[in-house]
């Protein structure tokens, strides 16, 4: 059984000591941290055990101490998709957890040499959370022919994994793309755009570039040196309107590859170049490739509805509303609530008088849409006080 790291903080200032306990957690996404909210007015400043469980996965459990109003929050990161049950203070609630969407990028060399091994690089990234994808990547053409298969290995960040796809071309292939197949249901499948390689004579150095590049978004440029050439350095440049601009400084070649991180600043067509030389300058070479840099990604727009309409500007304690959130990317949207309300699954519940803020977070698509958030505010009012009964007249003597 996994023990969670706990954080107890004040959540709500509720006044109804006899109110029943409420435990809530919003629908989530694997690897994306959220909060379990506990409101137990009858258990002020007491320890409460919280259990989260779903079939086929070891239950997660921890203890939290409520504040003087009987409230607390518990940070939690879902580890698997499915329907989860949350139990605390003698009550339960349920929520749904989605697989984390992924994006796949294929970096391909600009020129292939017949009967010589070609090395393509695929990067698979989780669009949210802190878990790197696991599974396999295949290099396929539009007809379903498989040219190479490789297992993912952890990348340089905790949200990405890489695979090197090796094959030996004998003739010019159809355009190729990388297809990611997840190892578990925790990740969504994805695939890259197509790359169209060409066959040409053997070269000392060739470029290996991603299929898409965007203004302001860092991309990895790679120069691949012919096997057996030995160590040396690479220098990259970009050519815009016939003028060369160097990108960074010299880069060492490690295992026949030198890399440069580059964030394009210009929109449209330009040429990327690379120059290579061994340390003794006995061997040198260069390569270039025309690329089209796309506009900077736009925010992944979020739409949130409550009971099929706009989130109400005002709510009353005890009111509920069914939330539905969508994003332009069509990927899952995560929801969170702060203030005088909580979210259980997809249900917004008003618990106490005061402001209620619901925040919707969209993940983007790893390409032309970037992650974004949008907040919505409602005011929760206390229910009207019950009318007082008129005092009885004293009995006459």
Image (cartoon, rainbow, N blue to C red):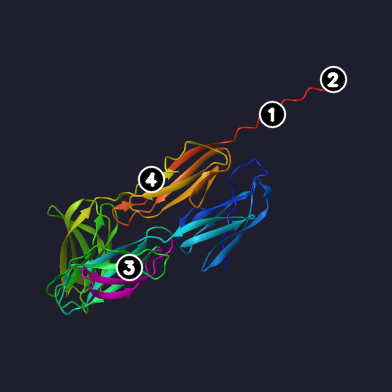
CA gap between label 4 and label 2 equals: 67 Å
| Mark positioned earlier in the residue sequence (4 or 2) | 4
Q: Nearer the viewer, mark 4 or mark 3?
A: 4
Outermost residue to the right: 397
Report which residue position mark 3 lands on.
180
Q: Secondary structure at mark 4?
A: strand
Outermost residue to the top: 397
- The residues colored magenta run 130-158
Instruction: Report the quarter where the N terminus lies.
Output: bottom right
Report which residue position mark 4 lands on.
303
Image coords of residue 213 (percent x, y): 25, 57
Report which residue position mark 2 lands on.
396
Residue at 57% over, 42% down: 318
- Do tag 1 and tag 2 residues touch (Cβ < 8 Å)? no
| Mark positioned earlier in the residue sequence (1 or 2) | 1
Q: Is residue 236 above or below residue 363?
A: below
Q: Secondary structure at mark 2?
A: loop
Image coords of residue 393 (percent x, y): 78, 22
Report which residue position mark 1 lands on.
388
């Amino acid at each position: 059984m996994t023990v969670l790291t706990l954080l107890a903080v004040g959540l709500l200032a509720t006044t109804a000591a006899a109110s029943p306990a409420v435990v809530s957690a919003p629908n989530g996404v694997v690897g994306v941290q959220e909060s379990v909210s506990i409101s137990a007015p009858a258990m002020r400043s007491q320890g409460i055990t919280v259990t989260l469980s779903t079939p086929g996965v070891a239950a997660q459990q921890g203890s939290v101490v409520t504040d003087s109003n009987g409230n607390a929050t518990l940070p939690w990161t879902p580890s698997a998709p499915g329907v989860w049950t949350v139990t605390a203070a003698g009550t339960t609630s349920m929520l749904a957890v989605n697989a984390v969407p992924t994006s796949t990028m294929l970096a391909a060399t600009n020129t292939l040499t017949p009967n010589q091994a070609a090395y393509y690089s695929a990067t698979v990234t989780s669009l949210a959370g802190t878990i790197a994808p696991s599974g396999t990547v295949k290099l396929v053409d539009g007809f379903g022919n498989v040219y190479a298969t490789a297992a993912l290995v952890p990348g340089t960040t905790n949200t990405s994994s890489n695979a090197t796809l090796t094959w030996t071309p004998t003739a010019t292939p159809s355009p190729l793309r990388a297809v990611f197949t997840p190892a578990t249901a925790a990740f969504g499948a994805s695939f890259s755009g197509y790359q169209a390689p060409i066959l040409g004579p053997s070269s000392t150095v060739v470029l290996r570039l991603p299929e898409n590049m965007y203004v302001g978004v860092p991309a990895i440029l790679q120069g691949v040196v012919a096997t057996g050439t030995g160590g040396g350095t690479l220098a990259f440049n970009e050519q815009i309107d016939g003028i060369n601009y160097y990108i960074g400084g010299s880069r060492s070649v490690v295992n026949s590859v030198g890399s440069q991180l580059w964030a394009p600043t210009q929109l449209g067509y330009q040429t990327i170049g690379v120059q290579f030389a061994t340390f003794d300058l006995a061997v040198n070479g260069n390569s270039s490739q025309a690329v089209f840099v796309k506009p900077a990604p736009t925010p992944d727009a979020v739409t949130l509805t409550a009971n099929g309409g706009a989130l109400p500007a005002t709510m009353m304690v005890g009111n509920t509303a069914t939330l539905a959130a969508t994003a332009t990317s069509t990927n899952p949207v995560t929801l969170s609530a702060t203030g005088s309300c909580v979210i259980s699954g997809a249900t917004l519940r008003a618990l106490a008088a005061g402001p209620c803020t619901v925040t919707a977070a969209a993940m983007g698509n790893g390409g032309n849409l970037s992650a974004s958030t949008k907040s919505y505010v409602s005011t929760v009012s206390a229910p009207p006080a019950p009318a007082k009964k008129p005092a009885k007249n004293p009995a006459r003597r």
